[in-house]
Structure formats: C-alpha cells, structure tokens
Amino acid sequence: MLPLVTEMSKPTDLVQGTLDLLLLKLLALEPLHGWAISLRLRALSGDVLQVSEGSLYPALHKLEQEGWIKAEWKTTENNRRAKFYALTRLGRKQLETEAANWKRLSSAISHVVQLSEI
C-alpha cells in the first residue's frame, strides 16, 4: 500500500492499486509532468489527496514499464525541461479495467459501511 496524506495531515494507506487508477485517470485527461500530476491530484481532490515524490515517481515508472503510459521530455510552462507522461492505448484499456474494479470495490465497501447498527 502507498502512503497518502489527508487534509488532516494524518498518514493513511491507499487501497492497493488506487494510485495507479488515479494516475491513469489524470493522464487520460492530458499529458502532464510529475509535479503537475501532484498539483492536479491535490487540486481535484480538494487538498485531500497528496502523493509524495517517493510514491509518485516509482508508480509512474511502473506504469511506463507496463506500457500503460509513455514519457517524453518537453519544456514546461516555466521553460524547464521535464518528463511529460501520456496515456497509451493499452493504458486506456487498463484505466477502464481499473475504474470498473474500483467501482465494484467502493460500492461493496459503501454497502457494508452503511449497514444499520443494532
């Protein structure tokens, strides 16, 4: 499991594979460099989800090895060179699979959590 920081700044654990799903989804929207991925995740989650560099870059490397994303060196908006990551066709298929699995898992968890107590 990968560490994640919540808005209360308490470390928590991501469900196995959740970071992969989040990264694939963000990169399906547009190619981004690592720092931009981190900022976008934080912004879109209302500052709830924050991923450390120590978790982000190994996860990106793994996704690249799987063939789900590709990387290309480009110049950022601040005129710096950075590796931009983009989703591949194989990555889009993986995103569909991961999103379906997440929907099933989160629905099951919600069902159990919402059970009435005695």
Image: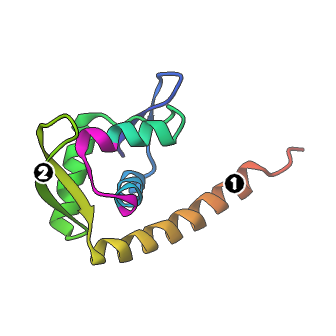
Could you tell me what secondary structure mostly forms the magenta stretch? Answer: helix
Task: Look at the picture and state if 66 lies above or below 46.
Answer: below
- The numbered mark, 1 or 2, whose residue comes first in the sequence reads 2
Residue at 17% from the left image edge and 54% from the top image edge: 61
**In this rendering, position of residue 117 left or right of residue 104:** right
Crowding at dot 2, Cα within 10 Å, few <14 / some 14-19 / many 20+, comes out as few
Residue 50: percent from the left, percent from the top?
Answer: 40, 34
**In this rendering, position of residue 97 left or right of residue 31:** right
- Look at mark 2 in the image and give the residue it sits on: 74
Residue 67: percent from the left, percent from the top?
Answer: 20, 71
Task: Look at the picture and state if 4 lies above or below 115.
Answer: above
Disc 1 to disc 2, C-alpha distance: 42 Å
Q: Nearer the viewer, residue 27 or 109?
A: 27
**In this rendering, position of residue 96 left or right of residue 73:** right
Residue at 40% from the left image edge and 42% from the top image edge: 40
Say which element carries label 1: helix
Q: Which residue is the extreme one toward the right?
A: 118
Residue at 73% from the left image edge and 58% from the top image edge: 111
Q: Which mark is residue 110?
A: 1
Q: Amino acid at mark 1?
A: Ser
Residue at 47% from the left image edge and 37% from the top image edge: 43
Q: Which residue is the extreme one toward the top?
A: 9
Which colouring convention does the figure follow? rainbow
Foreground tag (1 vs 2): 2
Q: Which residues are magenta?
A: 28-37
As for residue 82 lying within the magenta part, the answer is no
Say which element carries label 2: strand
As for residue 31 lying within the magenta part, the answer is yes
Task: Look at the picture and state if 63 lies above or below 82.
Answer: below
Q: Amino acid at mark 2?
A: Lys
